[in-house]
Amino acid sequence: MALPAATQEFEQGLRDAFKGASSKHVKFDFKGGIDAPDVPAPLTEPDDMVIVTSPCHSYEPIKVPEEGSGPYHCLVCGQAFAV
């Protein structure tokens, strides 16, 4: 998304740099440009997960599918637990 704006700034900088150049050896001719990309669709995530906390390290919960059955494992120590 930032590429067109950055390119425009770069192009303007080149135009300004070569504005006073009147030499046979230096020629600046700009043709073209970069079109702005299409705006991407917003990211969506289905709400089909529940948060489960392990009995050993409750400060580090995990997200699991609603219809999941386990066993699940603690992210900190790896201990298996059931819900």
Image: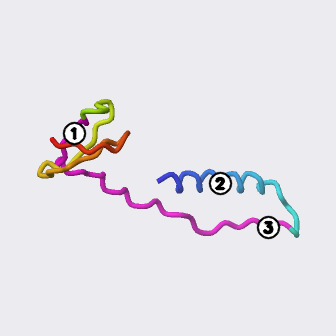
Q: Residues within 10 Å of mark 1 (few under 14, many from 20)?
A: few
Q: Is residue 28 magenta?
A: yes
User: Which residue was labeled with disc 3?
Assistant: 27
The answer for how far apart the CA atoms under marks 2 and 3 are is 17 Å
The answer for how far apart the CA atoms under marks 1 and 2 are is 47 Å
Location of residue 16 in the rendering, given as x and y in whole percent from the top left corner: 73, 51
Q: In this view, does 81 lie to the left or right of 37?
A: left
The residue positioned 54% from the left and 51% from the top of the image is: 5
Amino acid type, callout 1: Ile
Q: Over which residues does the magenta segment extend?
A: 26-54
Amino acid type, callout 3: Lys
Amino acid type, callout 2: Phe
Is residue 47 depicted above or below 35 in this figure? above
67 vs 70, nearest the viewer: 70
Q: Which of marks 1 and 2 is nearer the N terminus?
A: 2
User: Which residue was labeled with disc 1?
Assistant: 51
Which is the main secondary structure of the residues drawn in magenta? loop
Q: Residue furthest right?
A: 24
User: Which dot, 1 or 2, sits closer to the camera?
Assistant: 1
Circle 2 sits in a helix, a strand or a loop, which is it? helix
Circle 3 sits in a helix, a strand or a loop, which is it? loop
What is the number of the mark on residue 10? 2
51 vs 41, nearest the viewer: 51
